[in-house]
Amino acid sequence: MEIFKLERTSRTPFVLMDPTKGLIEIKGISIPNNSYEFFTPLFERIERYVLSPTSITTVNMELEYFNTSTSKALLELFKKLAVLTNVEFNWHYDNDDEEMLEFGKNYETLLGREFNFYQLA
């Protein structure tokens, strides 16, 4: 599989999936008009990736803001990855953004998988 990359826009986040490194990153603001349409190419790649993953998969999330539609899409994304035995979820948030921290904790609870939480300076 090849590297999948979407550049950040004013409404969509930077997205990177490097299947050879087992790395997925999503950074920025996510308020697309249709989150499922935006995330579908990533979903499709993840569905193929989980059939033959690397020894460890790292998911780095660093979102400043996202809408309700994105929230649902992220849950679907995390569920697709949670089938892996060795996946590390890293949730990065601004040190003064308690709401974003709570979103990460909610995903952790919904998935029943441990997240690593990192404050950004």
Image: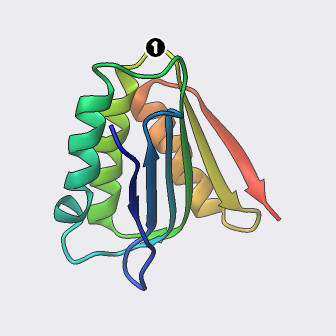
Q: Is residue 41 left or right of residue 95?
A: left
- Give the residue drawn at x 43%, y 59%: 15
- Give the residue drawn at x 67%, y 66%: 97
Q: Position of residue 118 (x, y in %)?
A: 73, 48
Q: Is residue 7 left or right of residue 120?
A: left
Q: Position of residue 52 (x, y in %)?
A: 34, 19
Tell me: residue 4, above or below residue 20: below
The chosen color scheme is: rainbow
Residue that protrudes farthest toward the front in the picture: 2
Query: How many numbered discs, if any?
Result: 1
Q: Position of residue 17 (x, y in %)?
A: 43, 47
Q: Where is residue 30 in the image (x, y as percent from the top left)?
A: 40, 70
Q: In this view, does 60 lie to the left or right of 3?
A: right
Residue that protrudes farthest toward the right in the picture: 121
Q: Hey, what amino acid is under mark 1?
A: Thr
- Give the residue drawn at x 32%, y 42%: 77
Residue where numbered disc 1 is placed: 85
Q: Which one is nearer the viewer's eye here, 23 or 69?
A: 23
- Label 1 element class: loop
Quadrant in the picture for residue 53: top left
Residue that protrudes farthest toward the bottom in the picture: 10
- Give the residue drawn at x 48%, y 43%: 106
- Mark 1 closeness class: few <14, some 14–19, many ≥20 residues within 10 Å: few
The quadrant the N terminus occupies is: top left
